Image (cartoon, grey):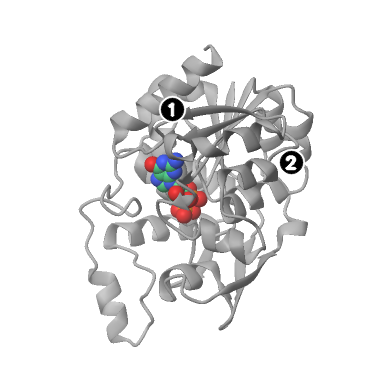
Amino acid sequence: MITALGGGVGAAKFLKGLTKLVPYKELTLIINTADDIELYGFNISPDIDTIIYRLSGNIDTDKGWGLKDDSLNVLNSLSAFGVETWFGLGDRDFATQVFKKELSQSGKTKTEITNLTASSFGLENLNILPMSDESVETWIETSEGIMHFQEYYIKHRMEPEVTGINLRGITEANPSPGVLEAITKSELIIICPSNPIISIGPILDVKGIREEIVNSPAKVIAVSPLIGGKPLKGPADKLMRGLGLEASSSEIANLYKDFLDVMVLDDSDSGEVEKINSLGIKTFVTDTIMTDDEKSKILSEKIMEYLGN
Ligand code: GDP
């Protein structure tokens, strides 16, 4: 059994390759829900939707999120009512949210909603779990005040200076059913190339998850989301610096050092190898830029070959 922890865009690209090698029934995905947001009357889970859309072949590959061939009629009509429409949800994506909302109103949990949504997209055999059924929200403290992560990222285009991060609800959040069991049963745990602060960090902070990974006999590997010390997309470097950390793969390895066995690094970060090895963590240096599904598959093949599987 393999368990993978991930956020949205980077994780989805990586998992598209991994699932070409590993059968769905041998895999459990634990996905971040700390960037969920209440908007347009819905509780939107961007990371879970991104994973489902990419793995089911429905992603807008140019953007890396949202559904392909989507349109913006609902959003444009909403703006005529004076509603703020900075969060770009397409028409087909609105249908996903209506489906989820109906399930939520009938009493279904986030885990059940995720499962039913994934099944509707043809992923009935893949175990996709939200990190928790309880609500967690990421709020960013900035030079311009505190704001929801999506507001900081999309509306304010990551411009305000980050001074702190607040995960609302995290101390009360319990792992969703199946999360701890999946970790216990796994021989391999993969930390996807996702934001270490606001995607992987919150998953590890949910009650018991980090301890379960630390105590697990499984091999734990992480794929760095940084290329030459920078994210391909998103605010990983800005958030790390905002917390007084260095934006580097060795700093990420340091964040995971209580459980990490192997860090997979991009060729452009080979200068970090010694520093990571000095933490007692092995390194595997390769091309980690996944420009298409084939490159994602090749990356997973190389990792499996390195691990001797
Ligand atoms: P988000 O929550 O949708 O922003 O997605 P993630 O938590 O998955 O984080 C995005 C991270 O994925 C960024 O730090 C990117 O650098 C990383 N990423 C995206 N594409 C790639 C890729 O092709 N290779 C690697 N190594 N990282 C990637």
Q: Which residue is mark 1?
A: 18
Decide which of 182, 194 is in the foreground and name it.
194
Which residue type carries mark 1?
Leu
Lateral position of residue 104 relative to residue 204, left or right: left
Number of marks in the rendered image: 2
Name the spot of residue 288 as percent of width and height, x first: 41, 35
Q: Contact, CB < 8 Å: mark 2 with mark 1?
A: no
Density class for disc 1 (Cα within 10 Å; few <14, some 14-19, many ≥20) is many
Q: Disc 2, ligand 1: is the CB inside 8 Å?
A: no
Instruction: Identify the residue at horizontal 60%, vertical 47% (top origin).
Output: 200
Q: In the image shown, does 168 or 71 lie closer to the viewer?
A: 168
Residue 303 picture location, percent across and down: 48, 23
Q: Is residue 236 above or below residue 20?
A: below
Give me the disc on residue 240: none
Q: Is residue 18 visible?
A: yes
The single residue placed furthest to the top in the displayed view is 308
Instruction: List the residue tagged with mark 2.
Output: 210
Q: Position of residue 266 (x, y in %)?
A: 45, 36
Question: Is 218 situated above or below 264?
Answer: above
Q: CA distance from mark 2 to mark 1?
A: 23 Å
Sequence-wise first label, 2 or 1: 1
For badge 2, the amino acid type reads Arg
Give the quadrant of residue 261: top right
Question: Where is residue 220 drawn, in percent x and y?
Answer: 64, 28
